[in-house]
Amino acid sequence: MNAPVAAVLRRVNRTLLGLAGLLLVVAGGAVLAAAFDLAVPSWWPWSGPDDVLLTAARRQRWRDEGWWWPTVIAVLGVVVLLALWWLLAQFRRGRLAEVLVDTGDGDAAVLRGRALEGVLEADATAQEGVAQARVALTGRRTAPRTRIALLLEPYASPGQALAGLGGEALDRARTSAGLAELPTEARLRAVKHRARRVN
């Protein structure tokens, strides 16, 4: 996801969280004020501890109207779809979809981010002692960054794994994409294994 889209998503998240928080504070304050029988203004939705949130008349007001249930179902469907879109957008946040490659003639070619991630994962996994590698491309199209998680075999040396990653896989990816630099954050974890019994 490129930077403008990520910025918009951050603003949408903050706005939604702010509105949800404000709504909860107002609703909670109204309920607490009524529950403690505090002096409240005449426009307050609940006036005392014996007041109900929804009266029977309000609950059954539109029940016999033909348009009521289709409208309720449609509105709830839209809310569910928006919630699913928002949830999926959280998982996609931060990944770079494409990288601009300088071709040297004034133009730029586009390299898919997934392709570069796949090549980096294959190169990192091919190293001695690396059981698995996961790569996520972040940053901007003209200045990508990588996050790499390496799962090391029990016998692997973390120092050698990092040296191989920086000296081979990342250098090859940076050169092939025509990038001046490719900042990388690497996280290493060892494969869980049982302790060997020594006789």
Image (cartoon, rainbow, N blue to C red):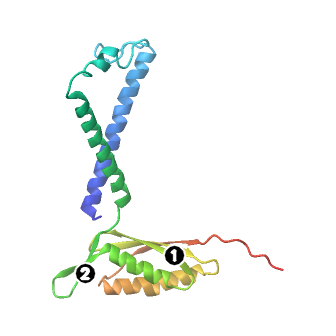
Label 2 crowding class (10 Å Cα cut-off): few <14, some 14-19, many 20+? some
The answer to whether 134 appears left or right of 10 in the picture is right
Residue sitting at 31 percent across and 53 percent down? 10
* Disc number placed over residue 101 in the picture, else none: 2
Image quadrant where one finds the C terminus? bottom right
Q: Where 94 falls versus 48 (above or below)?
A: below
Residue 16 location in percent, x, y? Answer: 31, 43
Most extreme residue toward the left is: 106
Of 9 and 41, nearer the camera is 9
Q: Amino acid at mark 1?
A: Gln
Question: x%, y% of residue 97?
Answer: 29, 69
From what the image shows, is residue 3 above or below residue 112? above
Q: Which residue is mark 1?
A: 132
112 to the left or right of 120? left
Q: Nearer the viewer, residue 190 or 194?
A: 194
- Residue 198: x and y in percent read 80, 79
Q: Residue at x 26, y 33 (%)?
A: 72
Residue 157 position within the rendered picture, expressed as x and y whole percent measured from the top left: 60, 81
| Residue visible at 31% across and 38% down in the picture | 19
Quarter of the figure with residue 65? top left
Q: Label 1: how many residues lie within 10 Å, few (<14), some (14-19) or many (20+)? A: some
Image-based side of 175 in relation to 101, left or right: right
Q: Earlier in the sequence, mark 2 or mark 1?
A: 2
**Does residue 152 appear to the left or right of 103 in the view shown?**
right
Q: Dot 2: what SS?
A: strand
Q: Residue furthest right?
A: 199
Circle 1: element type: strand
Foreground mark, 2 or 1? 1
Q: Residue at x 38, y 87 (%)?
A: 172
Residue flagged by tag 2: what amino acid is it? Answer: Val
Does 71 appear above or below 62? below
Q: State how far apart marks 2 and 1 are (Cα).
A: 28 Å
